[in-house]
Each structure stands twice: as C-alpha cells, then as structure tokens.
Amino acid sequence: MIFVQVASFEEWRQKARHLLLARVPPAEVDWEGEGLFSEELPAPEAGTPHVPKAFVEAAECAACFREPRKWDLLYRILWRIQHENRQLLQVASDEDVSALRHMVDEVRRDSHKMKAFVRFRKLGDDYIAWHEQCHLVLERTAPFFARRFGPMRWAILTPDRSAYWDGMDLRFGPGVPRSQAPSDDAMEELWKTYYANIFNPARVKVAAMKAEMPVKYWKTMPETALIPGLLAGAEQRVREMVQVEPIVLEERPDLWAARLLQAKAPLGEIAQAVSRCRGCELCEKTHAVFGAGSHAAPLMLVGEQPGDQEDKQGKPFVGPAGQILRQTLAALRVPVEHVYLTNAVKHFHWEDKGKNRLHKRASPTQIRICRPWAEAEIQTIRPRVLVCLGVTAAQSLLRPDFRLTRQRGQLIESPLADKVLATFHPSYLLRIPDPEERAQQRALFDQDIALAYQLSLEA
Ligand code: SF4
C-alpha cells in the first residue's frame, strides 16, 4: 500500500499523474494515509495521460469538498476513465460518478452562499468579513470579491483560511477563529439601517428564508436581528420600499423584480435586470435568456429553461424543441405579434457529456429563486391566456404538486391570467422513441395549443 497525503488540488494532480503513469491501481493507494509519498514507487512510464477537460473541472471543484475521501474517489475515477471507460462521467447511475456530482453540487452551493452571505465591516480604511464555510471554497470564491470590490482593501476570515485583497493582489493565509474576528460594529449599524430600508415584508416566507439563508450564517449577518421587528410592521412597510443598491439586487431576484414592478418598469428594463441577475449559481456558466415576442401578447407560453441553442443564440425556443412549438403555432396561423415566449428559469442548466452540454433540470430551489422574473413578465404583459409548457413551468407558476398526467389541457384557476392551462414541454415529444406514441402525444400537444390560441382570441 502506498500512503499519500496532499493538501491541494495541484498537489493531488501531480501525484495522481505520477501514480497513473506508474500503473498503480487505486486499491494500492491510500490518499488519507499517514505515511509519505514513497520514493520507491515504480518509475512512471513516459507519456501524458489524456484526461477529459470535464473531469479536470469537476475534480478541481470536488477538491474543495471538506472530507478527505475525495482524493481516493478522484483517483479511482481517473483510473477508471483511463482503463475502463473514457465516457465514465456520462454514466449518471455509476456510484463513483454520482458521488463526484454530489461533491461538485455541494461545493458550488457553498460558494454561492459565500457570495450571498458575506458581510464586510469597516475597520479603519479596510473592510473585514468573517464567514463560516461548509466546504473549502474560499480560494475558489475570493476572486469574485476581488472583481466586485476591486477598489476596496478587504479580508475575508474563515476558521480554515483567510483571503486578503490589497486592490492589486489576492493572497491567502491561515484561518482565524471566530473569537479573533473583529467586532467593530460601525459597519454593522450601517448595514442594519440599509437592510431595514430594503426589507420587503411582502415577499418574506420565513421557512424559505431559513432554507436560503441557513441559520448558521445569521450570527454574522447583522440584519437578521431586525427581522422579527420588521415583520411586525409588515403591512405598513410593503408600501415603503426604497432605493436598493444594485449590488444586493443582483442577488435578490424577488426584491429586484418587486421594485421594477412597483416602478412599472418596461419589459426591456426587466430583461436588463435578468441579464445581471446573480440570484443562483446558474448564472456562473451561461447567459440569461429572457423572453421574446410582443409586449402586448394575449397569449404567453412559458417553458422550463433555455437549452444549448437558446443559450448560444440568446433567444427562447430556437433549438429542436422550440422548432416543434413553432411548427404548431405556424400550422395554427398564430400571428407573431400574438405570442410571447419565455421560460420559468432564465439560465441554461447543463452537465458535461463529452462534447455536448446536456440539459439538467434546475433544482427546486433554483426554480423558486427565479420565479419572480417570469412573474414580472406575466404581470407586465398581462396575457389573456397563459400556457405552462412542461411540469417545471407548471410547478413553478401554479402549484408545487402539479401533475401533467392529471391536469394537462384543463383550465386552471390562477391569479396569473384569465385562462391558464398546462401541456407537455415540446422536448418531451422529442424523447418519445415509439413513432406511434409520439404522434399521439403530439396530437394532444397541438390540441392544447390550439385551445389556448382559441381562448386568447375570445374577448
Ligand atoms: S437562473 Fe434565474 S435566479 Fe438564477 S441567476 Fe439566472 S436569472 Fe437569476
């Protein structure tokens, strides 16, 4: 058995490469071992192992996962990619691949939470924040703060590591326990005043807030002490929303959309806001795709999320599924100015499948966070008829337990529009392998869209 200890992804990468070229199988390496990387290792063969880019990216992310078992897992997957299946990462049912995906998701979520929940306090000319990370995401996330707060000098302290930005360079040092974090609260008072002003009680759902802003972060977030008092005066304050700084709005689609609606902002302004939204981690990999069509359309169709083509072209429903929908609308001779097309989630969520970016369903949290944007489109356009295409749109806009199998094609009571119904997402039709069944389901889809069009023509 070879015992190896590593402290960083780069170190793991070098040692894994050596072991791979020396043909040492995963069962003979203990990456959490107490021993040293032995010089008696078999010499590596010459050459460079070809490692898929998707694996390197996933491994770099999973390296931030807090548990040391990650190194064993990464080497095992690397070995299996080389010796067993070069497409291994595409086998979602594989236990190792599933564990890797879990780690990647957890790390991304924690990084996003750091971006959303870090609060700086002013200390002299500098700004200091203390944050408790679940995983080791500081190095990965600190460049975000350097970009965002470029002109400031700041430090983010965590119990594991600390990051320092002097306006030019980003450096990292040892961690700082909570007891040593600065307690100067001039910044705290400023932040409390500011938070009291941006607080939107009309949108507060305490359970959802706890899910998004876990209680463990509350102690470093001064505004949380204000919440009970603010909730007590909620009704009065609904009408008192004031200016919100863009920096916070970018992370709060609910506040931003509410403010734009209150100001009766035109659709173009809402589209611009969506293009800058950082409400969830989906904004990190793709562009926002806003709705398209007439701003006075009586018929609005809402799909799930943009796909690969939509992300590349920046328009909704231009990929293969969109072609099906457009064929149906064309066959019904629906005028272009009669329709508005959009999606429940504005960013393409995908996973790497070799050369392709494969659609991945957005999580319930991402769907919920993004919902204010689709609601803002609906409230601005006020279509007579609203059609949810697929269960994601229906569950986002209508009811979380909506079932297409029970309610497809039926009129549903909803405050969103006079007439609301749901049908299949056209991508579902593309996935039906049996031609006969596909034709049957297509006929139902066409029938639902025809009904929606007919209703939208009625006064
Ligand atoms: S998916 Fe929605 S909430 Fe998430 S970043 Fe994009 S626009 Fe914002």
Image: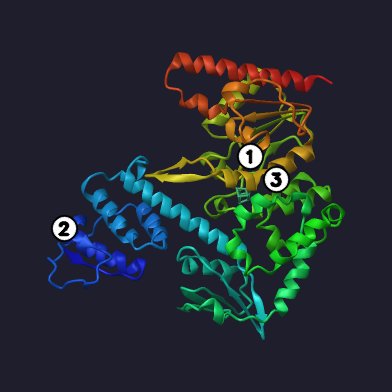
Tag 1–tag 3 contact (CB < 8 Å): no
Q: In the rendered image, which quarter is residue 457 located in? A: top right
Residue sitting nearer the eye, 67 or 58: 67
Vertical placement of residue 10 versus 391, above or below = below
User: Looking at the image, which residue is at 78% across and 50% down?
Assistant: 202
Task: State the CA–CA distance, disc 2 to disc 1.
Answer: 49 Å
Task: State the CA–CA distance, disc 3 to disc 2.
Answer: 53 Å
The image position of residue 5, as x and y in percent, is: 28, 70
The image position of residue 276, as x and y in percent, is: 65, 55
Vertical placement of residue 421 versus 177, above or below = above
For the N terminus, the quadrant is bottom left
Residue 259 placement, left or right of 160: right
Residue corresponding to mark 3? 372
For the C terminus, the quadrant is top right
Tag 3–tag 2 contact (CB < 8 Å): no
Per the rendering, the mark at residue 441 is none
Residue corresponding to mark 2? 23
Looking at the image, tell me whether mark 2 or mark 1 is earlier in sequence order. 2
Few, some or many residues within 10 Å of mark 3 (<14, 14–19, 20+): many
Residue sitting nearer the eye, 222 or 414: 222
Per the rendering, the mark at residue 344 is 1
